[in-house]
Image (spheres, rainbow, N blue to C red):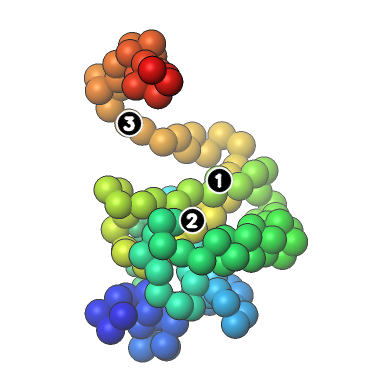
Amino acid sequence: MSDCIFCKIIKGEIPSYTIYEDEIVKVFLDVNPVANGHMLIIPKKHYENVFDIDPSIISHSTNLIREKLYPMIKEKLNCDGLTIAQNNGFGQEVKHYHIHLIPRFENDNGKMSFDKDMLKPIDEVYSKFEKK
Ligand code: AMP
C-alpha cells in the first residue's frame, strides 16, 4: 500500500535498523522500544492483521523466532526471556501486520497494563461463551 509506513520500509523508502530479512519477512528494531532489542517482524506483502494474513507467514515467523531470532537475541543481549505481542484493531497503531519481539530481563518491571475497573465478575463473562 502506497501510504503504509511499513510498506515504505520494505521498499527502502524509509530507513530501518534491519536485523534480518528473507523473501517473506523483514525484521527491524522498533524505533520507540520498550526494551533493549525490541524488534518487529513484518511480512513483505501487505496484510492488515491476523484476520487477513496468510497463516503460512505466521508459521514462518514462529519458526524464525525459534530457530534464528531468539537464539541471536539471547546471545547478543543476554536476555532471560521473550515476550511476543501482536495487536489487531484497537491498540494497533500501524495497520500492516507485525509481531513485536520484546526481550525480557530479570527485574525489567515490564507488564501489560489495563484498566481493572472495566472488569466484570468472571462468571458473568463466562456466561457469554456458554452454550445455551
Ligand atoms: P502497534 O501499536 O502494535 O501497531 O505497534 C507499532 C510499532 O511500530 C510501535 O511500537 C512503533 O514504535 C513502531 N514504529 C512505527 N514507525 C516505525 C519505524 N519507522 N521504524 C520502526 N518502528 C516503527
Mark 2 in CB contact with mark 1 (< 8 angstroms): yes
Side (left or right) of 94 relative to 101: left
Task: Name the residue located 30 percent from the left edge and 20 percent from the top edge.
Answer: 119
Which sits earlier in the primary sequence, circle 3 or circle 1?
1
Q: Is mark 2 within 8 Å of ligand 1?
A: yes
Whole-percent x, y for residue 96 in the image:
37, 67
Q: Is mark 3 within 8 Å of ligand 1?
A: no
Q: Which mark is residue 114?
A: 3
Side (left or right) of 63 relative to 88: right
Point out the quarter of the image occupied by ligand 1.
bottom left
Whole-percent x, y for residue 115 in the image:
28, 27
- Write down the residue under mark 2: 100
Which sits earlier in the primary sequence, circle 3 or circle 2?
2
Q: Which mark is residue 83?
A: 1
**Label 3 sits on what residue type?**
Phe
Q: Is residue 66 above or below residue 131?
A: below
Whole-percent x, y for residue 4 in the image:
30, 76
Quadrant where the C terminus sits is top left
Whole-percent x, y for residue 16 in the image:
44, 78
Between the residue at mark 3 and the residue at mark 1, the CA separation in whole angstroms equals 17 Å
Say which element carries label 1.
strand
Mark 3 in CB contact with mark 1 (< 8 angstroms): no
Between the residue at mark 3 and the residue at mark 2, the CA separation in whole angstroms equals 18 Å
Disc 3: CA contacts within 10 A as few (<14), some (14-19) or many (>=20) = few
Observer-nearest of 101 and 91: 91
Which sits earlier in the primary sequence, circle 2 or circle 1?
1
**Label 2 sits on what residue type?**
His
Q: Is residue 24 above or below residue 101?
A: below
Give the quadrant of residue 61.
bottom right
Say which element carries label 2.
strand
